[in-house]
Image: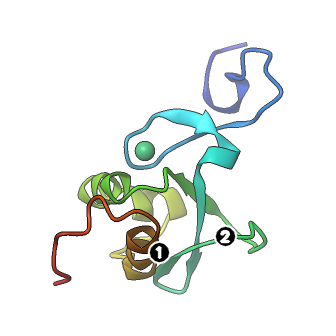
Amino acid sequence: MRQRGKLEYGGRATPQRTCVGCRVRAAGSELLRLVLVEDHVVPDLRRRLAGRGASLHPSVRCLELAERRRAFPRAFRVPGPLDVSRVRAHLEEENHDMSCRTPS
Ligand SMILES: [Zn+2]
């Protein structure tokens, strides 16, 4: 069996997800689940929304990394561009460490 994708759990029970921003793997529960609603990436806080999801550390820095590498269109398999303002607003509410930039 090749060591790829979902088969890298290493025997641990917790499913691992990869953050689309920094590409670091973490337990799914540590990452924010994002889903696509039309052209908007929105946080799926209750993990209830159907459809393809992407995982992101709940950090503005990872969101910016993901935007820079255009990870969202790739994760959702759409041509993009996608609106991430709702994710950004959510993250800026949660952590204020990176909040010194004005929205464009
Ligand atoms: Zn990350």
x%, y% of residue 89? 40, 78
Q: Quadrant of ligand 1?
A: top left
Is the residue 83 above or below the residue 51 in the image?
Answer: below
Measuring from the top left, give residue 29's x and y in whole percent: 69, 47
Amino acid beneath label 2 = Leu
Quadrant where the C terminus sits is: bottom left
Query: Would you say residue 83 is visible in this rendering?
Result: no
Q: Earlier in the sequence, mark 2 or mark 1?
A: 2
Compared to 70, does 31 lie above or below? above
Label 1 SS:
helix
**Secondary structure beneath label 2:** loop
Q: Are marks 2 and 1 in contact (CB under 8 Å)?
A: yes
In this picture, residue 62 sits left or right of residue 53: left
Q: Quadrant of residue 32?
A: bottom right
Q: Nearer the viewer, residue 38 or 96?
A: 96
Closest to the observer, 74 or 67:
67
